[in-house]
Image: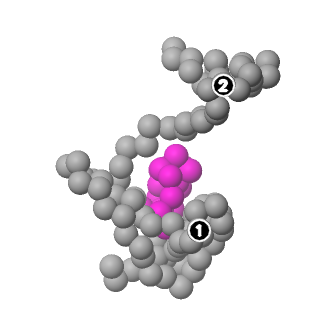
Amino acid sequence: MQHNCINLRLPTYGGLWAWEFEKDGRQVNIRVNGQLTYNSIYDCLDAAMAGLGVAYVPEDIAQPYIRTGHLVSVLEDWCPYWSGYHLYYPSRWQPSGAMSLLIAALRYEP
C-alpha cells in the first residue's frame, strides 16, 4: 500500500482496472493509488522497467524481464492463475470458413 502503483485505464472497462488477487480461494480486487495511468499494459510495463512504480501486468509479458533481473515479481502467492483466452460468439450464427478454422485451432489440445 506504500508503493507508487501504475494504473491501467481501459476505455472498454469504464475506468481504472482494479488489481485482482487470489489466495486460498479468496478473491480480492483492489483499486490502487499512483501518479501514473496508462491506456496500454505495455506502457505500464515500460514505466515499471524505468523504476517509476509497481505495475500489475500479465506474467508472460513480464517474464523475460524477471528472468534477466530487470523486474522483480511481488505477491507471487496472491497471483491468480489465468486459464487463457476465451472466445464468445452467437450460437445461432453461421461462422465463415476462416472463423471455423480459428475456433478449431483454439479448441485444439495436443
Where residue 51 appears, as percent x and y from the top left, is 52, 75
The answer to if 67 sits in the magenta stretch is yes
Image: 68 above or below 55: above
Position of 22 relative to 92 (above/below): below
Q: Nearer the viewer, residue 52 or 103?
A: 103
Judge left or right: residue 42 versus residue 75.
right
Amino acid type shown at disc 1:
Gly
Span of residues in magenta: 55-72
Which residue is the site of mark 1? 14
Residue 62 lies, in percent from the top left, at 52, 54
Closer to the observer: label 2 or label 1? 2
Question: Is residue 88 within the magenta segment?
Answer: no
Given residues 15 and 68, the one toward you in this image is 15
Q: Secondary structure at mark 2?
A: loop
Q: Are marks 2 and 1 in contact (CB under 8 Å)?
A: no
Q: Position of residue 23 (x, y in %)?
A: 24, 53
Which residue is depicted at the point 48% across and 50% down? 59
Q: Residue 27's image quarter? A: bottom left
At x 54% / y 78%, what residue is drawn?
A: 52
